[in-house]
């Protein structure tokens, strides 16, 4: 209107679009104030434009009341009189805008309320970052809106963020979207609102090494920066204070950002690491005897007899694996390398401080290597722990300093393990050289207290003197788990026939409590004919912090379906899609266990309704946590013909008596197979044997299959024993070729 032409023009539509996006409009040749108004209205960055018509109206009104002083340069081909008319048109536009301002403000108010409602809907649907960004925009447009407090209660909270030294730029993004753009919040010290979301935070300041944090909701965030020239290469600084459950006082320390790689370990070999005894400071102990230097060096050889990790050949690592974590090394080799590098193996306390600082791991394991396909190059998976160290969850287990009996701790889990082992303690004999175990190193700023280096043995209840409750008391407890067998109202939700081993049927049915529905996944074998024998599965503790059943969850049932048996996998209360959104106290855990047992009973009820299931041939398989849960649940459910407990044992803690597995074990009288590892740190033999002894099964109908290994055993060691047990007590699977 002011220039009599369009601001952008090209010879073709493409050229015009290019001009709109990238070029600046030509000068109007009008009053400078009008030039500025038009330029702002056409700004490329939306944040630089007028945010509403009210702002534009006010600017035009100011222009109307100012003294006319046109530029000496008129628009070509146009008289001064025409220019005056155009200026008058602009003034008329200002009047129109002013007249419509009140209508706009009413519409803007309605639109703002809709945006507030959308923020809440986004938050409720789990799109927390989208809700957060929209709430920030609403705040920026009207910072004095008191009603935004209600909106922010659903999205995020004020969190002080400080850095030492101050003046660092703070950026955040959704932890589970590592490829997304960083959002700049400002410079420290600041008190921004942070979303209720597991976040990645980057802290950057010129002259200092960037710091990344992985953090959930916290009362405050303090970050210590180190000058670039004083930061050890590829290490992160870990705070020694503040971890939940911390039992030993720690100083700040440095930890390798990544696991030690094959290429790094090769430098140790090339420097004569296996010939120079100065790096081998620890006595070489195997069991109760000391191994001589020459004997040990003969055992610490690669597949060709050269010094090096077990899987190497001719003193070299496999091609294209330079950046993959070294594995197949004993604890002694890892400790010698650390000495060579001027570092140490971290103690259990230091390792857990860095990995589990917030006792939060569900998001970390989602971005970590538990895929079961082998170790990945360092950092290929973006699962960073709180202080910015990668692959502490999965990839390879990591040797730590502390002993437990004749073993040494290996923490974090490997690519072959269930993801919950990130949180648990496991261990191996220090001479073991397995493909799933590697290490990373620490560097301490002060001497480590002896309390952090000492041998660790988890406390164990004395089941030699304890006795289960009486039959009379047990009947009272059993009634707490009873439920009314009301109609299931079952419904087939989905069927997936894509897997070569099974047809997966997703079904829902009414729970035995409240108005909830239970989801269960039934895996029907393709190599057998109905009616199918069925095993009801209960997964490990990972189910309580994962969002859905994944490939690792199915790893422990696939072979049973391959044997010609169906497997029912209920989504129990508190697991996967039904997991608790807030931590449970002791009474909440008690109530949840009772709901879980009712879910198990309802699952058996459902199996009894299907004509393709043999209701007289139903077994139970519990893995880890599922082997503990079995004790109350199976004791009150008498429709199982046999039970398999894998990786279970009695507890070292004292739960409430109505949930204590110890009081239920004698009431399980069906045949039971216990499968355990001799070096299981979570349920050691001292907790396995009392369970086996107290089981109420007939002596000839219970077996404790104890093999070499830790909490998670190689599947090949347990498949035959498990299937032989099922054949014995359920009979051979019918219709299997």
Image (spheres, rainbow, N blue to C red):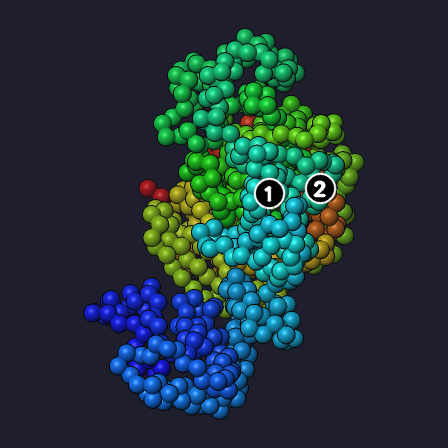
Question: Which residue sits furthest left?
Answer: 11
Q: Mark number for residue 241?
A: 2
Res 510 visible: no
Q: Secondary structure at mark 2?
A: loop
Identify whether 137 is placed above or below 674.
below
Residue 91 locus on image (x, y percent): 43, 88
How would you rate the neighbour count of disc 1 (Cα within 10 Å): few for under 14, some for 14-19, many for 20 or more? many
User: In what quadrant of the picture does the N terminus appear?
Assistant: bottom left
Residue at left offset 58%, top offset 60%: 195
Where, quadrant-wise, is the C terminus in this rendering? top left
Name which residue lies at 71% across and 36% down. Answer: 250
Is residue 179 rendered to the left or right of residue 467? left
- Percent across and percent down for residue 622 are 56, 45
Find the distance from the CA under tag 2 to the CA under tag 1: 13 Å
**Residue at the limit of the structure toward the front, as seen here:** 72
Q: Which mark is first along the chain, 1 or 2? A: 2
Instruction: Give the answer, above or below, for where 484 lies relative to 231.
Output: below
Label 1: state its secondary structure: loop
The x, y position of residue 123, in whole percent, is 55, 66
Give me the residue at 56% from left, 23% from top.
Answer: 341
Give me the residue at 63% from left, 56% from top: 217
Which residue is disc 1 drawn over?
Answer: 387
Left or right: 229 as drawn, with respect to 307: right
């Amino acid at each position: 209107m002011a220039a009599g032409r369009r601001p952008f023009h090209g010879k073709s539509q493409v050229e015009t679009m290019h001009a709109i996006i990238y070029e600046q409009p030509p000068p109007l040749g009008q009053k400078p104030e009008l030039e500025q108004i038009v330029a702002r209205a056409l700004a490329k960055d939306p944040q630089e434009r007028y945010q509403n018509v009210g702002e534009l109206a006010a600017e035009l009104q100011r222009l109307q009341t100012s003294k006319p002083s046109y530029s000496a340069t008129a628009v070509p081909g146009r008289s001064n009189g025409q220019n005056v008319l155009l200026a008058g048109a602009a003034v008329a536009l200002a009047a129109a805008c002013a007249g419509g301002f009140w209508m706009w403000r009413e519409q803007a108010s309605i639109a703002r309320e809709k945006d507030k409602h959308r923020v809440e809907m986004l938050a409720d649907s789990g799109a927390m970052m989208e809700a957060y960004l929209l709430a920030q925009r609403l705040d920026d447009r009207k910072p004095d809106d008191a009603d935004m407090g209600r909106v922010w209660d659903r999205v995020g909270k004020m969190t002080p963020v400080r850095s030492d030294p101050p003046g660092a730029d703070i950026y955040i993004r959704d932890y589970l979207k590592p490829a997304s753009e960083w959002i700049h919040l400002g410079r420290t010290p600041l008190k921004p609102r942070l979303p209720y979301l597991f976040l990645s935070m980057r802290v950057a300041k010129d002259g200092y090494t960037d710091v990344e944090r992985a953090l959930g909701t916290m009362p405050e965030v303090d970050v210590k920066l180190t000058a670039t020239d004083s930061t050890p290469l590829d290490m992160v600084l870990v705070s020694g204070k503040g971890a939940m459950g911390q039992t030993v006082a720690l100083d700040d320390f440095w930890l390798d950002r990544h696991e030690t790689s094959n290429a790094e370990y090769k430098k140790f070999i090339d420097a004569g690491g296996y010939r120079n005894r100065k790096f081998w400071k620890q006595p070489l102990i195997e069991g109760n005897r000391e191994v001589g230097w020459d004997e040990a060096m003969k055992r610490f050889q690669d597949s060709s007899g050269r010094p090096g990790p077990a899987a190497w050949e001719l003193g070299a690592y496999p091609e294209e694996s330079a950046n993959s974590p070294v594995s197949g090394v004993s604890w002694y080799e890892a400790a010698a390398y650390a000495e060579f590098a001027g570092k140490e193996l971290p103690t259990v306390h230091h390792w857990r401080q860095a990995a589990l600082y917030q006792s939060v791991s569900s998001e970390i394991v989602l971005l970590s290597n538990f895929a079961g396909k082998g170790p990945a190059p360092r950092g290929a998976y973006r699962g960073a722990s709180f202080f910015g160290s990668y692959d502490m969850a999965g990839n390879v287990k990591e040797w730590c300093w502390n002993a437990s009996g004749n073993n040494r701790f290996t923490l974090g889990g490997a690519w072959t393990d269930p993801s919950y082992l990130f949180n648990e303690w496991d261990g191996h004999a220090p001479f073991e050289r397995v493909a799933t175990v590697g290490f990373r190193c620490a560097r301490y700023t002060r001497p480590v207290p002896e309390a952090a280096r000492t041998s660790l043995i988890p406390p164990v209840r004395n089941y030699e003197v304890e006795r289960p409750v009486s039959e009379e008391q047990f009947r009272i407890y059993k009634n707490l788990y009873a439920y009314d067998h009301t109609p299931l109202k079952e419904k087939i939700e989905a069927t997936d026939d894509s897997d070569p081993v099974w047809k997966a049927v997703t079904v829902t049915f009414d729970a035995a409590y409240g108005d909830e529905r239970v989801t269960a996944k039934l895996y029907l074998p393709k190599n057998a004919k109905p009616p199918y024998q069925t095993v009801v599965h209960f997964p490990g503790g990972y189910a309580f912090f994962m969002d859905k059943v994944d490939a690792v969850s199915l790893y422990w049932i696939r072979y049973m379906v391959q044997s010609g048996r169906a497997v029912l996998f209920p989504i129990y209360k508190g697991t996967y899609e039904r997991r608790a959104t807030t931590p449970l106290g002791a009474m909440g855990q008690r109530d949840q266990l009772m709901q879980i047992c009712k879910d198990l009973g309802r699952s058996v009820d459902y199996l009894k309704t299907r004509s393709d299931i043999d209701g007289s041939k139903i077994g139970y398989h519990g893995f880890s946590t599922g082997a503990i849960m079995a004790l109350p649940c199976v004791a009150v459910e008498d429709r199982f013909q046999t039970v398999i407990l894998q990786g279970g044992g009695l507890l070292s803690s004292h739960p409430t008596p109505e949930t204590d597995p110890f009081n239920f074990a004698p009431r399980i009288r069906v045949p039971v197979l216990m499968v355990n590892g001799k070096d299981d740190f979570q349920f050691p033999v001292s907790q396995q044997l009392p369970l086996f002894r107290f089981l109420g099964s007939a002596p000839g109908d219970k077996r404790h299959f104890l093999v070499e290994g830790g909490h998670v055993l190689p599947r090949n060691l347990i498949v035959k024993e498990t299937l032989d047990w099922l054949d014995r007590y359920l009979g051979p699977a019918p219709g299997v070729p």
